[in-house]
Image (cartoon, grey):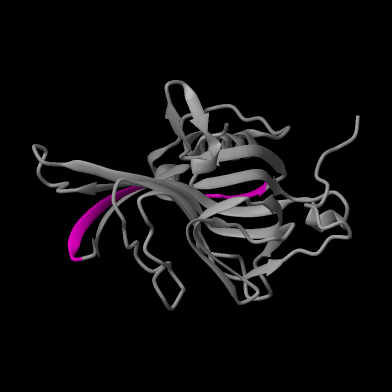
Amino acid sequence: MMSLLRIGLVCLTATAALLGAGPASAQLRPMSEKELSATYGQGLLDLTNSSFVSNGDTLYSTRIAIGADVLLNANFGKINLGAKTTNGVTDWSTSYIDMPVLQFGRLDSTADKRLVQITNPYFEFVYKNAPDAATREVVGMRMGFEGIKGDIGLTINTLSGSMLIDGVEYKGSKIAGPAIPGVTAGDVNGASRDFWISALKTAVQFPTTSGMAEPPSVAQTGFWLNWRDRLTALSTANGAPPPNAFRR
């Protein structure tokens, strides 16, 4: 089954590959002091340290983001997060998140629907007592996108998280997921801005997402999916996620 770390690494690897692809080539050459002084640039990876208050405690975070807009078509399957294993036997019914299908893009519509736009994918690590090396403790992590726009096919059997789709709220731990074939993320006002999945030892109140009026729901212990901004349910003829695989 696919882990949260693997999903994140796949997204980051795809991002890096897309940014590095293309027919153009260049050769390194020395630059004069005048040329250097007139040149501006930014690294691909952006590292930010910050702190915030969660349930009365000060927590510290380190975010590693890829500063880029990426167009992506990809399929993920059998995403199963947090299932318990006893004596080598995994009980999948204990999963925090059971998502058999997650598709970025679709092939049964117009060309502009084939790709999903992702802005600034990131990993963020959360700590207690960060200034004191002797007592510093990792609370958990989350991965997400600062923006996502497009059609996403999905099937969610079990949800631990907080979603808001067409004004209908799905919120709780290990509840039944929304019975829809997917969502359209973003609208005429812009991309959806609050998609992330966390893995935590204790519950965390993450800060309010930039541009939004209210803070997210408190992310609970274990795995937690947050996605509430600018989501509309997809509608398909057969009620299944739209096709997103090329036939050979």
Query: Is residue 173 something that shows in the picture?
Result: yes
Question: Relative to 198, is 19 above or below?
Answer: above
Q: Position of residue 219 (x, y in %)?
A: 38, 58
Question: Relative to 8, is 184 above or below?
Answer: below
- Quadrant where the C terminus lies? top right
**Most frequent secondary structure within the magenta stretch:** strand
- Quadrant where the N terminus lies? top right
Which residue does the image show at 22% across and 55% down from the upper left? 59
Observer-nearest of 239 and 38: 239
Number of numbered discs visible in the structure rendering: 0
Observer-nearest of 149 and 35: 149
Q: Quadrant of residue 152?
A: bottom right
Q: Position of residue 170 (x, y in %)?
A: 55, 66
Q: Position of residue 24 (x, y in %)?
A: 70, 34
Which residue does the image show at 66% across and 54% down from the upper left? 117
Highlighted range, magenta? 56-71
Task: Using residue 192 as the reference point, say whether residue 31 is left or right of it.
Answer: left
Query: Is residue 40 something that shows in the picture?
Result: no
Q: Position of residue 182 (x, y in %)?
A: 71, 58
Residue 163 belongs to the span the image colors magenta: no
Task: Using residue 123 as the reference point, say whether residue 138 is left or right of it.
Answer: left
Task: Using residue 142 as the reference point, say whether residue 21 is left or right of it.
Answer: right
